Amino acid sequence: MKKSLFEIVSNIGIAKSVWKMVLRGDTSDITKPGQFINIELDGFYLRRPISVCDVNGDEVTIIYKAVGKGTEYMATLQPGVKLDVLSGLGNGFDVAACGDAPVLLGGGAGSAPMYLLAKELIKAGKKPSVIIGFNSAEDSYLEEDFKALGLDDVYTTTVDGTKGIKGFVTNAFEHLAVKPDYHYICGPEVMMKVVYDALECDGQYSFEERMGCGFGACMGCSCETKYGNKRICRDGPVLVKEEIIW
Ligand SMILES: Cc1cc2nc3c(=O)[nH]c(=O)nc-3n(C[C@H](O)[C@H](O)[C@H](O)COP(=O)(O)OP(=O)(O)OC[C@H]3O[C@@H](n4cnc5c(N)ncnc54)[C@H](O)[C@@H]3O)c2cc1C
Ligand code: FES
């Protein structure tokens, strides 16, 4: 974990209440997809944890949904503002654990960490499929970015059917060109539980638990697993399928 100042390079709206922020700083502790950064905001007691969507040299990209006072404040921040950031937090996804044909599943804001994961899997010689789910077309993003990585098997699902396949991420399973041999997922718990029940193959699940410190000191994010209690911020946010107790 590293505590340092990052400068906002850009902060733009990309969907309804969804913002993409590029920050410049010391990214050396960000080593795996699925890790997160924890951002201090002026006037807020707790930092706000946000997943790493992409890293390029000294720039890190995050995508966040404005859901409350902290993220609404983030959406007002202009380029040039410096933020105190804890970087390199969390265990991240293990890209070596899967076979050649994993499926990446993102629900809403949980789609963001799937982007860096897709890049790392491609680098490792694998060909992931991607399914990202949203409520409506106006909430959706990232499909074109995944396609620009050279991936063909990329699907957006929307609950109201205004974009892509109507329904939930599970409704896209029948469209996949290759039967997945492994899955990686991040999204609302209810969505992850449905996928857990629907897919027989192994997988890794990223949990967006509410957090206090974000680095293992307060036990505020402790959850029970089959291998004992784990702190989602430090021992997670990624848990393997077999250890999860819903
Ligand atoms: C490891 C991790 C990675 C995350 N990555 C992302 C990301 O990439 N993009 C993104 O948009 N969000 C992400 N989140 C969720 C994000 O941290 C919260 O939405 C944010 O902290 C809310 O702050 P707020 O002050 O705007 O809202 P608050 O005023 O604190 O809360 C507003 C609403 O958001 C809900 N909320 C608050 N914290 C969380 C949380 N941790 N998880 C789910 N719901 C929450 C509350 O229940 C409430 O309904 C992540 C959370 C974790 C723990
Ligand atoms: S948030 Fe403090 S231990 Fe996880």
Image: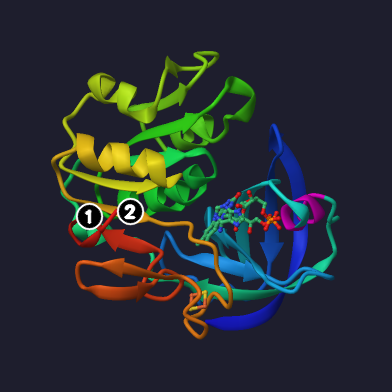
Query: What element does badge 1 sit on?
Result: helix
Relative vertical location of residue 207 with respect to residue 63 in this rendering, above or below: below
- Report if residue 162 is visible in the image: yes
Instruction: Name the quarter showing ligand 1.
Output: bottom right
Residue 156 image point, x, y percent: 45, 25
Query: What element does badge 2 sit on?
Result: strand
Question: Based on the displayed image, in which of its 4 quarters is residue 78 positioned?
Answer: bottom right
The residue type indicated by label 1 comes to: Lys
Please, what is the dominant secondary structure of the magenta stretch?
A: helix
Of callouts 2 and 1, which one flags the residue occurring earlier in the amino acid sequence?
Answer: 2
Boundaries of the magenta span: 70-75
Crowding at label 1, few (<14), some or many (≥20) Cα neighbours within 10 Å? some
Name the foreground residue: 123 vs 105: 105
Residue 4 image point, x, y percent: 68, 81
- Report if residue 127 is visible in the image: no
- At 30% from the left edge and 62% from the top edge, which residue is drawn? 239
Q: In screen coordinates, is 211 left or right of 176? A: right
